[in-house]
Amino acid sequence: MKLYNTLTRQKEEFKPINDDTVSIYTCGPTVYQYAHIGNMRAYIFMDILRRVLKYNGYHLKNVMNITDVGHLVSDSDEGEDKMVKTSRQTQKSPWEIAEYYTGIFMNDLQELNIGKPEYIPKATEHIAEMLEFVEGLVDKGYAYETSDGIYFDIMKFEGYGKLSGLDLEGQIAGARVDVNEEKRHPADFALWKKAPKEHIMQWPSRWGMGYPGWHIECSAMGRKYLGDEFDIHTGGVDHIPVHHENEIAQSEALLGKPAVHYWLHGEFLLVDNGKMSKSLGTTYTVADLKEKGFSPLAYRYMCLNANYRSKLNFTWDGLKAAQTALDRLLEGVLAHKTADPQVRIDEGTIKGFETEFEAAINDDLNIPRAMGVAWNAARYGTKSQELYKLLLKMDSIFGLDFEKAQAKADESAPDISPEIQELVNLRQQARKDKNWKQADEIRDKLSQMGITVEDTPQGPKVVFKDSK
Ligand code: AMP
Ligand code: ZN
């Protein structure tokens, strides 16, 4: 299988360190507010990667951290810690806030059929590992102390900028005007911050009380659970120029070799062709989609129809179209599910679909192309259970609940009173129990009421005699 490596800027054949288990680190959410659907796109991408690797027979060791300390309002070490800021605004402790938003995030993952990573460590529970990392960097001469913290000295690390391809001038131009005159270089970044007395989250260290920088969290937790070297690191494209550049610098400086073999980045979700914006009210959440009557899986379907390396523009009309398309696809799946089991189609046709599908998913997770194959299979003229089986296999990648496909309630169906419904249910049960006598009696009773029951593949259908 091929994956596009941001570091080498090309699709590469994926060769894991270990033959049967793939190790992955995914930058997790900062849990100070609701995750928006853009954040969730990043985790749908993680999920697709997980599913494709599993399809190829690999076991997974995937870490996704929960950032509950250290992520400052600005990525360039300025401003307040996001958790602390929300805590101040809401009068709740950072721990309460983290617990609340982590719970909602986990629920969102479930609603979008996103598989849970094997390890979900919290930053606040790994301060010791982070301190060990920082101490190592200081001891090796890659970091220095200032009056407000410990900073990484990027001039000491030769490869700084190699992930984003920005030279140092570019990095500096991109950084905000720096206010910290003690830093040796404007792009030097905080590994550890000294905490003023009133700072809510703080831990003891060699340098007094303090708290970790955001970038060190991922390096320290990745190392703890996956070892010094691991296969894949994922995140959104916004992480390339600062967060991941810094992760590379600190890990490689400490370990003397690259920690990550493949860097994978998911592109952004836009709303109405722009950045999601709080002030415009466009930072939608999964709950917002549901409130408007959409299924979270319609959003998942929308994401699957764009390549993970392309921008995707969200509009409500687009979501409506995705919902309609998904419903149609499920109807196609259902036609195969309910097909006569005797019907066979030639093996070559099935194999052809399967081969095309596998080529697509293994070509740097080309899910839109794979979806095209699924559509062709779903619309295939001859309906057969074999194709249904193949569609279910494809759905192990899509995660769109194909096996739950069922006929939509017939809108022209008559209103049925609870009394009739109960008789219909009783008859169903009697048939299940092979109690034919009772089933017939109930049928007769219904018939006297002017009702017949037709048995369809979707279950019993009530028909009023005079409406026929
Ligand atoms: P954060 O909670 O801000 O650390 O972000 C969690 C994940 O969401 C990261 O991988 C970001 O790169 C990603 N992300 C943030 N905004 C968007 C967006 N609009 N579209 C796609 N991914 C995003
Ligand atoms: Zn990270």
Image (cartoon, grey):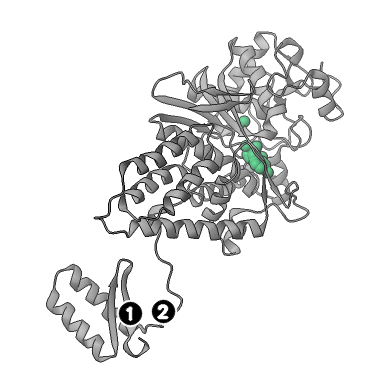
Q: Position of residue 436 (x, y in %)?
A: 13, 75
Q: Position of residue 373 (x, y in %)?
A: 47, 45
Report whether the residue tagged 1 is closer than 8 Å to ligand 1. no
Q: Dot 2: what SS? A: loop
Distance of mark 2 from mark 1, alpha carbons? 8 Å
Q: Position of residue 94 (x, y in %)?
A: 64, 43
Q: Is residue 183 above or below residue 213?
A: above
Q: Which mark is residue 237?
A: none
Residue 113 visible in the shown view = yes
Out of 88 and 455, give the one closest to the viewer. 455
Q: Are marks 2 and 1 in contact (CB under 8 Å)?
A: yes
Q: Dot 1: what SS? A: strand
Q: Crowdedness of circle 2 by 10 Å Cα count: few (<14), some, many (20+)?
A: few
Residue type for callout 2: Ala
Q: Which mark is residue 462?
A: 1
- For the C terminus, the image quarter is bottom left
Residue type for callout 1: Val
Q: Position of residue 366 (x, y in %)?
A: 54, 37
Residue 118 visible in the shown view = no
